[in-house]
Image (cartoon, helix red, strand yellow):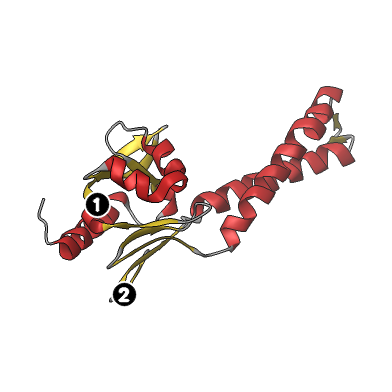
Amino acid sequence: MAEKSDYGIIYARWRTGAFGAAAVGIGLIAFAAIVVTRNGIAGIPFSVDLQTMAIYLALPLGGALLLGHAHHAVRREPTVVADKDGITVLYTKPPVGPIRWAEIQRFVPFRSNGRPCVGMVLEDAEHTRSLHRQNLAPLIRVARRKRAHLGIPAKMMNDRLPVIIRDLEEMRQRYTWRRG
């Protein structure tokens, strides 16, 4: 759940996907270790192909999954902050924002490569891009201008998509005095 306070909402990355990927990595490493260190199980020998696949496929893939996702599974840091000034995206390098509430026309849910995203439709997209220059590139890549100008993957915000959009829309209306 997102942390809500009097001054705003702090979102963090979903950790369930990172835990799942780390668990799969551990499983692949364990499988590769068994196949490489033993000749067989219960009198059934391992084939040379299985040993080769364990060494050149399961071990590197398991290591990459474990190393790549263990950091996200353990570390808990804010990724998006919505406060009275606007939305600040912290997971990008360098951070983007704040994108002022007056610059945002509405929030829409959409999918990018099958993954749910929170889209921001901007009042004047060219003006907002000129303010933030190159920092907006990761958010534009997600949106691809289909339904929104900017997009934030829902996995970066630890709440359900309808709740995220409702809360952000409520904050936008509160701080801009604009309805719908």
Q: Tell me what residue is drawn at x 67 percent, y 49 percent.
A: 66
Residue drawn at 29 percent across, 65 percent down:
85
Percent coordinates x, y for residue 164 in the rendering? 29, 55
79 with respect to 180 (left or right)? right
Q: Is residue 161 above or below residue 82?
A: above
Residue at the left extreme of this rendering: 179
Eyeballing the image, is 74 above or below 60? Answer: below
Residue 105 placement, left or right of 85: left
Residue 178, disc: none
Residue type at mark 1: give it: Glu
Q: What is the distance, in whole Å, between disc 2 and disc 1 at their CAs?
A: 23 Å
Q: Mark 2 vs mark 1: which is more N-terminal? A: 2
63 relative position to 69: left or right? right
Residue 21 visible in rendering: yes
Answer whether residue 158 is visible to the viewer in this image: no
- Residue on which the image places disc 2: 5
Furthest-bottom residue in view?
A: 6
Residue that appears at 21% across and 59% down: 172
Judge by depth and name the residue closer to the eye, 92 or 62.
Answer: 92
Q: Nearer the viewer, mark 2 or mark 1?
A: 1
- Mark 2: which amino acid? Ser
User: Label 1: few (<14), some or many (≥20) within 10 Å?
Assistant: some
The image quarter in which residue 174 lies: bottom left
The reply to whether dot 2 and dot 1 touch (C-beta < 8 Å) is no
The circle on residue 103 is 1
Q: Nearer the viewer, residue 133 or 54?
A: 133
Q: Please provide percent x and percent y for residue 114.
A: 40, 33
For label 2, the SS is loop
Q: Position of residue 126 (x, y in %)?
A: 30, 40
Quadrant location of the N terminus in the rendered image: bottom left
